[in-house]
Structures are given as structure tokens and as C-alpha cells.
Image: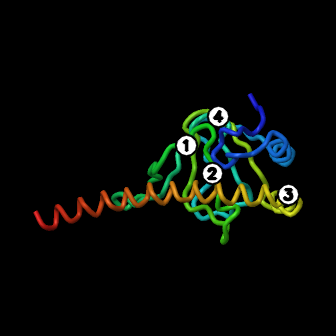
Amino acid sequence: MESKPSKKAAIFTGFTDGELALLHGISEFKVYDEGDIIFSLGEEVRRLIVVAYGTVALTLPIQIKGTSNNVTIEEKGAGAVLAWSALVPPHKFTLGARALTAVGLYEFDRDALARLFGEQPRLHLMIANNLNRVIASRVTLLEALVARDLQRWVSEKYA
């Protein structure tokens, strides 16, 4: 079911077919079965990941009655970028990820990306700009979650 990285992926917005071909040349395609752990919070990130197909749960370990449970924060599907921390020091996963369905992923080694960026500065700039949008959307989601919980806390405290 593998194809090539698509312009539909948020991280590849604005790329030409030739630029996508360069990225495809350094990508590795991996398949995960439903329920497989793709990565865990805190691990070192070596690869930028783009979802080709399937659904991935981004998770955060939360203590519930003394037991750690991985709670789904967000679900990501085809075109979503995961593991953007591969390009942002300190290169640690900020969430975990689990396959909710069979999942196909394009993985891009950060050292191979760095070499390609050295040869193709336009790619580096475009990835950086697109990555900023991806990170901003994640921050917006987390701000909404915090605001909802803060509102709940304030309402309960001052009811």
C-alpha cells in the first residue's frame, strides 16, 4: 500500500514533485498493526514521521488512581506529521503514539534530512515554515485543553 510522500501532508505544503521525489529517496516506509506502540514519551527522536494511511493516537501517560494510563490527547490520520521533535532539540518525544488501526508511515532520518537541507536550502526553509504551522496547531489544541480545565476548576472552586 506504499506510495510516495504526498503534497497533502501538512509538512509538504508547497513542494514540487521533484522536491517530493528527493524526500521519497531518503524515506523509509514502515507498517504498524492496530495496537502497536509507535513511540513513547521521552524517548530520543531520530526520525520525522508522516502518516501515509491509518489512524494514530497521540498519548500522554496520566496517573489515575495510582496507575499510569496512556490517555489519548489527539488522533492523527493520513497526511499528519508526527515526531517533529526530530528537527527540534532536545530531540525527545513530547507524547507517545499508538496505532489505532493498521498504519503506514514514512520515516525520515534527521541526519539524512540535515544533509538534504544542506544541498537544498529551499527544502529546509519550506519544512521549517510548514513545521511552524504544525507546532502552532498543537499549541492551540493544548491551550484549548488547559483553558477548558481551568474554566472547570474556577467554576467548581467558586460555585
Relative depth, front residue between 117 and 153: 117
Residue on which disc 2 sits: 82
Which of the two marks, 3 or 1, is nearer to us in this view?
Answer: 3
Q: Are marks 2 and 1 in contact (CB under 8 Å)?
A: yes
Residue on which disc 1 sits: 76
Residue 123's x, y, as percent? 78, 55
Q: Earlier in the sequence, mark 4 or mark 3?
A: 4
Residue on which disc 3 sits: 120
Distance between mark 3 and mark 2 Cα atoms: 22 Å
Residue 144's x, y, as percent? 37, 56
- Give the residue type that dot 2 points to: Leu
Distance between mark 3 and mark 1 Cα atoms: 29 Å
- Give the residue type that dot 4 points to: Tyr
- Give the residue type that dot 3 points to: Gln
Relative depth, front residue between 30 and 109: 109
Q: Earlier in the sequence, mark 3 or mark 1?
A: 1
Relative depth, front residue between 119 and 101: 119
The outermost residue toward the left is 159
Which of the two marks, 4 or 3, is nearer to us in this view?
Answer: 3
- Give the residue type that dot 1 points to: Lys
Q: Secondary structure at mark 2?
A: strand
Q: Identify the image quadrant of the N terminus.
A: top right
